[in-house]
Image (cartoon, rainbow, N blue to C red):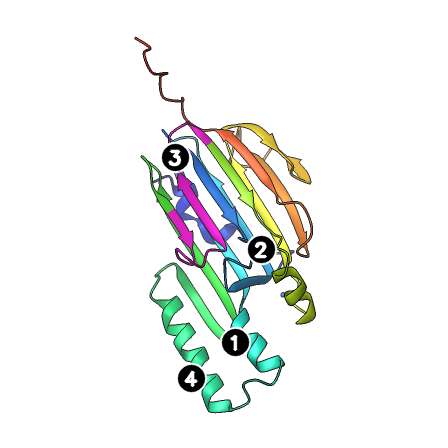
């Protein structure tokens, strides 16, 4: 794997401290489907046209059910709260991608996550794991890479989060040297030192109601049509 992908820790901006198939990357999946809400975060995903990928998530992850029980007063026993936080901590630490996980109260965890890999065929990568994704990368068969950062929440879940005072807030960055065929990025930039031909796509996340960030990349040639010779 290229050294550029190994030096992943240098990607986090100092100014923000406090795929032969389809890759579908769902960042911040709707909170009705995931019990984790990211907050005060920066995520950066790099995808090379040869299939290498790397991602970093740095920020907070809120386990919404526990947060809700605490702030509504349904759960008051300090030892029980600590036991629940310890169980969540153990569950997250089963994934070696979590380089740092630290409980900071009210069901919230300070997280640093780092993962490297390569897509060589159909596969799926979920963060933190399947069934509770705030990030999903899925390789399919038509050669298009879909990058979708679903920063919103479904009706009902959105209102519940707002009532709890929870609002996703952070930054999303996708970098690639492959051909992008569609995007709604807020900002696009080129000329990255050491990365000729790479383009950077950036979004700011400021709540659950904004349109989902998307990038569609023609990653690999589509399979031949049926009956083609």
Residue at the spot 65% in from the left edge and 38% down from the top edge: 185
- Residue at numbered disc 4: 83
Q: Is residue 199 above or below residue 164?
A: above
The answer to which of marks 2 and 3 sits earlier in the sequence is 2
Residue 9 x, y percent position in the rendering: 47, 54
As helix, strand or loop, the secondary structure at mark 3 comes to loop
As helix, strand or loop, the secondary structure at mark 1 comes to helix
Distance, label 3 to label 4, CA atoms, is 40 Å
Distance, label 2 to label 4, CA atoms, is 28 Å
- Residue at numbered disc 2: 42
- Residue at numbered disc 3: 140
Distance, label 4 to label 1, CA atoms, is 11 Å
Q: Which residues are magenta?
A: 125-144
The answer to which of marks 4 and 1 sits earlier in the sequence is 1
Residue 29 x, y percent position in the rendering: 53, 53
At label 4, counting other C-alpha atoms closer than 10 Å, the crowd grade (few under 14, some 14-19, many 20 or more) is: few
Distance, label 2 to label 3, CA atoms, is 27 Å
């Amino acid at each position: 794997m290229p050294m550029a992908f190994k030096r992943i820790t240098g990607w986090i901006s100092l100014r923000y401290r406090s795929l032969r198939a389809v890759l579908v990357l769902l960042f911040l999946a709707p909170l009705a489907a995931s019990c984790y809400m990211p907050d005060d975060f920066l995520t950066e995903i790099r995808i090379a046209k040869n299939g290498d990928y790397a991602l970093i998530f740095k920020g907070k992850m809120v386990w919404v059910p526990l947060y809700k029980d605490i702030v509504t007063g349904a759960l008051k026993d300090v030892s029980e709260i600590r036991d629940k936080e310890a169980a969540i901590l153990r569950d997250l630490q089963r994934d070696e991608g979590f380089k740092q996980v630290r409980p900071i109260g009210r069901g919230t965890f300070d997280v640093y996550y780092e993962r490297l890999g390569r897509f060589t065929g159909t596969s799926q990568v979920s963060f933190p794991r399947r069934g509770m994704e705030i990030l999903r990368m899925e390789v399919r068969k038509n050669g298009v890479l879909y990058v979708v950062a679903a920063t919103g929440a479904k009706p009902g879940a959105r209102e519940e989060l707002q009532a709890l005072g929870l609002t996703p807030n952070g930054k999303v960055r996708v970098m690639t040297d492959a051909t992008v065929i569609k995007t709604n990025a807020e900002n696009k930039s080129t000329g990255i030192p050491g990365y000729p031909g790479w383009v950077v796509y950036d979004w700011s996340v400021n709540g659950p109601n904004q349109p989902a960030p998307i990038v569609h990349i023609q990653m690999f040639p589509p399979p031949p049509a049926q009956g083609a010779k």
